[in-house]
Amino acid sequence: MSSRPALGKIGVWTAALKTDSLPSEQVSEVAAELDELGYGAIWLGGSPSPDQAGVLLDATSRITIATGILSIWDHEAAYVAERHTALNAAHDGRFLLGLGVSHSALAGERYRRPYTAMKEYLTALDSAPSPVPASQRVLAALGPKMLELARDRAAGAHPYLVTPEHTAEARDILGKDSVLAPELKVVLDTDLDRARTTARGYLARYLALPNYTNNFRRLGFEDADFADGGSDRLISAMFALGDAEVIRARVDEFLAAGADHVAIQAVTESPLADVPRAQWRTLAEALPLDKG
C-alpha cells in the first residue's frame, strides 16, 4: 500500500488496557503515559471493540491506537466500519483497525473457512456506508495465504508470536510497500531461569491453539518443542529474555529482518492482570522511540 499507518518503530501490545478489566480512569492515565514516553502505537489485545479503543484515543494526543486484534467473529462489520470512521474523524486519523480470524477454540462453531470469512469481512468493510479504507486496516497474518491477503487488501500485517525469521519470510511475501508490524513478547528479568519460567507459564496457553503450533512447525519446530510449556529452544525463539539491552538487540533483529514496527508485549508472572508500567518505562529508555 502506498499510504502507511503512522506507527513509529516501537509500540506496546497489551490486553490489559480495557474498561472491562480496569477502571476507565486508570486506562486513560496509563495510555497518556505511553503517549508521553514516545511509543508509536498501543496495540489493544483481546478482541477489543472500537469503543474500547476510543477510550485510549480520548486519553491521548499523538499515539496511534490499534486493535491487535479485533476478531471478525465478535464484531459486525457495518458497526465496526461506522465506529472506525467516527473515531478517526474525531482523533486525527489515529485509529488503526487490526483484524484477525482468532482461533477455533475461542470462536467455537462460528469458526468455519477462516480465510474465506476474512475475505468476506473485508468486502463488507469496503461496501459499508462508511467504508474502512485498505490503508487503515492490517491483518493478523501468519501463513502465506493470509499474508498475501494482507498485502492485497490491507495496509499490511500484524503477526503475533513470531520470530525474525518469520518476519523475513513475511516481508518477502508482502513486498516493500506493505507495513509489517510483528508482536514480540519480552520478559525483563536477568535471572534467565526465572524468566524462562515466566515465559513458559504464558506460552502454554498458546500451545493449545493450532494456528500457532502450525506456524511453529513451518518455522522448523517439532511436537517435542510444545511439551511442558515449550522447550528452551522455543522459548528463546519466541521471547526476548533479559535486560533492556538484550531486548533492544532482539528488536533490532526484527527491524533488520524487515519489520517496520515492533509491538512489545511485556510479560510478567501475572500477564493477564498486570499493567507493566515499570517495564514500559525501562524499555522506553532503551528502545528507539520518538522522544520529541
Image (cartoon, rainbow, N blue to C red):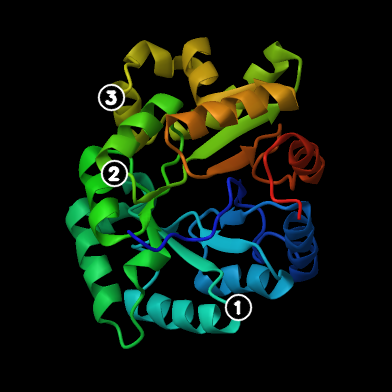
Q: Which quarter of the image is occupied by the N terminus?
A: bottom left
Q: Determine whether 199 is above or below 118 in the image.
A: above
| Distance between the alpha carbons at the discs numbered 2 and 3 | 20 Å
Report the mark closest to the observer, 2 or 3: 2
View extreme (bottom): residue: 129
| Distance between the alpha carbons at the discs numbered 3 and 1 | 40 Å
Report the mark closest to the observer, 3 or 1: 1
Q: How many discs mark residues in the rendered view?
A: 3
Which residue is tagged 1? Answer: 91
- The three-letter amino acid code for the residue at tag 1 is His
Q: Position of residue 230 (x, y in %)?
A: 48, 18
Q: Position of residue 263 (x, y in %)?
A: 56, 44
Foreground: 203 or 255? 255
Q: Residues within 10 Å of mark 3 (few under 14, many from 20)?
A: few
Q: Position of residue 148 (x, y in %)?
A: 23, 47
Q: Earlier in the sequence, mark 2 or mark 1?
A: 1
Which residue is tagged 3? Answer: 218
Q: Determine whether 80 is above or below 223 in the image.
A: below
- The three-letter amino acid code for the residue at tag 3 is Arg
Mark 3 secondary-structure assignment:
helix
Mark 2 secondary-structure assignment:
loop
Foreground: 81 or 267? 81
- The three-letter amino acid code for the residue at tag 2 is Gly
Does the residue at mark 3 contact the one at mark 1 (Cβ under 8 Å)?
Answer: no
| Distance between the alpha carbons at the discs numbered 2 and 1 | 30 Å
| Residue occupying the point 41% across, 75% down | 80
- Is residue 116 at least partly visible in the picture? yes
| Residue occupying the point 69% across, 46% down | 289
| Residue occupying the point 61% across, 56% down | 42
Report the mark closest to the observer, 2 or 1: 2
Which residue is tagged 2? Answer: 175
